Image: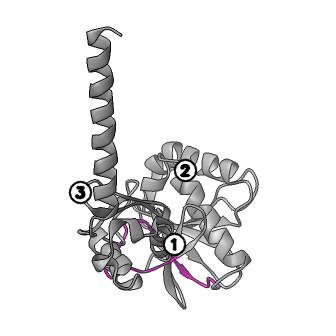
């Protein structure tokens, strides 16, 4: 065997021993701390990394006195999953001795202010209001049941607006009346937009935008108290009463 080959074998063997020793040391290393990294997905903050770190430490007795090898990362992931704001958690152990957790925050698209106050996210999941802060999303009020068809229709309208970046900046509130009709409050102008139900939303908003671009500029944004796109192929306007 050539001298160079022998040297290469010795070097590889030493490297293997170093890796083995490092792994052994790491396995018996004491947990130094917990670190959480949250992807907020472009949304406002509803839960902080510090809150989740405290949740993990409080939920796993003696975590900070354990050796790294004793930490069950699946248990850490289960603890993080108890937060209503987070999903898709992955936990691991760092070389530095920290327990690491990575998660994404759910993205609210509407804040419901009815008999109860809460958010609905992009999947329709209900999220409690947060002590950390609030999200800049459209607000829904009026006759909104805690669950069922009424809530789903409000969410469907909010999700439609959220999926159309050209529409969502135009409105800041959804209202549902006692009959189940949905209304929108535009940011510009002093009128309500009657949407009705959530059927034919493409047609309804096509007609509304056409009216906004061709009709209202001619008569003024405050001429009407209500603009209705509830009925197929129509935009029905109610003139504002003058005193």
Q: Position of residue 89 (x, y in %)?
A: 47, 62
* Residue 8 part of the magenta-drawn span: no
Q: Earlier in the sequence, mark 3 or mark 1?
A: 1
Q: Which range of residues does the magenta coloring cover?
A: 127-144
Q: Is residue 17 above or below residue 199?
A: above
Q: Distance of mark 2 from mark 1, alpha carbons?
A: 31 Å
> If the image is split into quadrants, where does the N terminus sit?
top left
Q: Tag 3, which secondary structure?
A: loop
* Residue 138 part of the magenta-drawn span: yes
Q: Tag 2, which secondary structure?
A: loop
Q: Is residue 141 above or below residue 182?
A: below
Label 3 Cα crowd, 10 Å radius (few <14 / some 14-19 / many 20+)? few
* Label drawn at residue 91: none
> If the image is split into quadrants, where does the C terminus sit?
bottom left
- The residue located at (41%, 70%) in the rendering is 71
- Residue 173 shows in the view: no
Q: Position of residue 196 (x, y in %)?
A: 68, 67
* Label drawn at residue 78: 1
The residue under label 3 is 96
The residue under label 2 is 163
């Amino acid at each position: 065997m050539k001298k160079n080959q022998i040297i290469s074998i010795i070097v590889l063997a030493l490297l293997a021993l170093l890796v083995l020793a490092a792994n052994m040391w790491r396995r018996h290393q004491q947990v130094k701390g917990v670190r959480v990294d949250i992807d907020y997905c472009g949304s406002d903050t509803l839960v902080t990394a510090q809150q989740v770190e405290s949740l993990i430490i409080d939920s796993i007795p003696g975590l900070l006195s354990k050796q790294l090898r004793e930490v069950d990362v699946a248990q850490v992931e289960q603890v993080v999953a108890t937060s209503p704001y987070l999903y898709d958690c992955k936990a691991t152990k760092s070389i530095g001795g920290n327990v690491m957790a990575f998660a994404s925050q759910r993205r609210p698209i509407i804040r419901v202010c009815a008999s109860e106050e809460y958010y609905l996210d992009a999947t329709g999941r209900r999220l409690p209001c947060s002590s950390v802060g609030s999200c800049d999303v459209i607000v829904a009020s009026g006759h909104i049941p805690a669950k069922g068809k009424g809530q789903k229709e409000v969410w469907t309208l909010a999700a439609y607006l959220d999926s159309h970046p050209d529409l969502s900046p135009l409105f800041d509130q959804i209202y549902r009346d006692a009959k189940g009709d949905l209304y929108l409050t535009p940011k510009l102008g002093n009128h309500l937009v009657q949407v009705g139900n959530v059927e034919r939303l493409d047609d309804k908003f096509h007609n509304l935008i056409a009216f906004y671009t061709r009709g209202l500029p001619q008569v003024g944004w405050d001429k009407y108290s209500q603009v209705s796109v509830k009925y197929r192929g129509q935009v029905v306007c109610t003139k504002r009463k003058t005193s």
